[in-house]
Amino acid sequence: QLQASGGGLVQTGDSLRLSCEAFGRAFSDNAVGWFRQAPGKEREFVAAITWDGGSTRYGDSVKGRFTISRDNAKSTVYLQMNGLKPEDTAIYSCAVDIRLYGFPPPTIISGYRYWGQGTLVTVSS
């Protein structure tokens, strides 16, 4: 129901924009979060945005470099990633807040459902 896309192989300092698109139903009444999982590591919170785009949250490791946004008319949430580092290498996935109109958007995995297939981001040094 959610499909992440936009990943790829980039160099340190480059930028990428990931997209998380909803299929089958819209999630315009739910917050959406991005998480990532690097090889051998646990899934990590990256960013989240409220249903109306009015509030955002970021993981400490991406603050100031990543920006989350959404376009409800397109049923799509974006993750603009600037200043990429090798430690950003991971599979990035998006998911929907289990609550309607939830605030603030959750930062924990259990707060989400409808996990989409991820997209791989590889940052070379």
Image: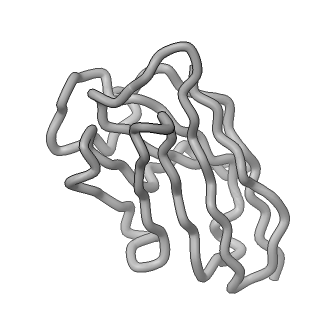
Q: Position of residue 28 (x, y in %)?
A: 34, 30
**What is the x, y in percent for residue 39?**
73, 49
**Which residue occupies the foreground of this view, 26 or 6?**
26
At 31% from the left edge and 37% from the top edge, which residue is drawn?
31
Where does the C terminus fall, quadrant-wise?
bottom right
Q: Is residue 46 left or right of residue 104?
A: right
Residue at x 27% of width, y 27% of height: 29
48, 38: nearer the viewer: 48
Where residue 27 sits, quadrant-wise, is top left
View extreme (top): residue: 24
Left or right for 69, reference 125 = left
Residue drawn where x is 23% and y is 23% of the image = 99
Q: Nearer the viewer, residue 73 or 19?
A: 73
61 left or right, relative to 6:
left
Number of marks present in the image shown? 0
Q: Nearer the viewer, residue 39 or 67?
A: 67
Q: Determine whether 54 is above or below 17 in the image.
A: above
Q: How is the image coloured?
A: one colour
- For the point 71% across and 80% down, which residue is it? 14
In the rendered view of the protein, which quadrant contains the N terminus? top right
* Above/below status of 89 relative to 99: below
Give percent across and percent down for residue 86: 71, 74
Q: Quadrant of residue 56?
A: bottom left
Q: Is residue 23 above or below residue 107?
A: above
